[in-house]
Image: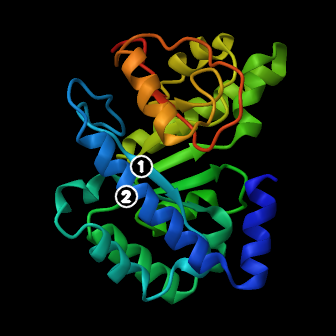
Amino acid sequence: MSPDLFVAAAEETGQIGELGRFALEHGVDALAALSARPGPRPGHCGHDDGFFMTVNISPRELDDRLGPTIDRLFDGRSHLVGRLVLEITETTLLQRSDGIARRLVELNGRGLRLALDDFGTGYSSLSHIQNFPVDIIKIDRSFITRLDGEGYDRQRAMAMIRATVSMAHDLGIRVVAEEVERESMLGALKECRIDLAQGFHYARPMPFDDLAAWLDRHAPGRTMPPAPKGNAAGTDGARIQSPSA
């Protein structure tokens, strides 16, 4: 079952809070375990020496209990709080209640980073990054997959991605390309100066123990090999160096 289906079901049945807390707790524990690993570690979001953990947050989880939950999870490991990224969708921001805006500002003030998913599909994407404390935007797959095509459609996609990246960088926002599935897409992403990419080209989702073994096999900074086939539960991201880097 895809996340879109079971998350929607959890929201309808009122179980999304429990599911979200489970994901957040395990995500922070995994972040702590990865950060404690010896040896070189991959960079992310402008940092060169550590892991980041991204956790999706539902609008219904943005209540007054989330802040205290974050404080509890980082008790004794507050040095890691800046490495947690809470990922929200444009649908969340479309609700634009004062309560949601206030809580996002409070979470950002705690040192957490906020990522806006599916950027470019909402009718008010630009106002979102102006009015909310967004640190990262993830360009929607509908733009990224066109880079694997040719002709006018590919040119238009590249022009829109370049414009988005330029604007984001001027605002101090990092940009992630979603669903990068083929090596043929990397040249265009570098040309567009994308900061990070995620997708099956690098690795398929995998259990935590498999991820630890995968990291042992692949040193940071090297070109990642195509991912093996298999099922999983997480997604890897990798840095995309710009042509001038």
Residue 75 or residue 198, whichever sits in front: 75
Question: Which numbered disc covers residue 109?
Answer: none
Residue 56 or residue 132, whichever sits in front: 56
- State whether residue 234 is above or below residue 147: below
Amino acid tagged 2: Val
Indicate which disc, 2 or 1, sits on the residue closer to the N terminus: 2
Q: Are marks 2 and 1 in contact (CB under 8 Å)?
A: yes
Residue 10 or residue 100, whichever sits in front: 10
Amino acid tagged 1: Met
- State whether residue 178 is above or below residue 202: below
Q: Which residue is mark 2?
A: 28
Q: Which residue is mark 1?
A: 53
C-alpha gap between disc 2 and disc 1? 7 Å
Q: Nearer the viewer, mark 2 or mark 1?
A: 2
Q: Residue at x 54, y 23 (%)?
A: 192
Mark 1 lies on a secondary structure that is strand
Residue 41 image point, x, y percent: 28, 28
Classify the position of the C terminus by image quarter.
Answer: top left
Tell me: 122 left or right of 83. Answer: right
Tell me: 143 left or right of 32. Answer: right
Residue 82 image point, x, y percent: 27, 55
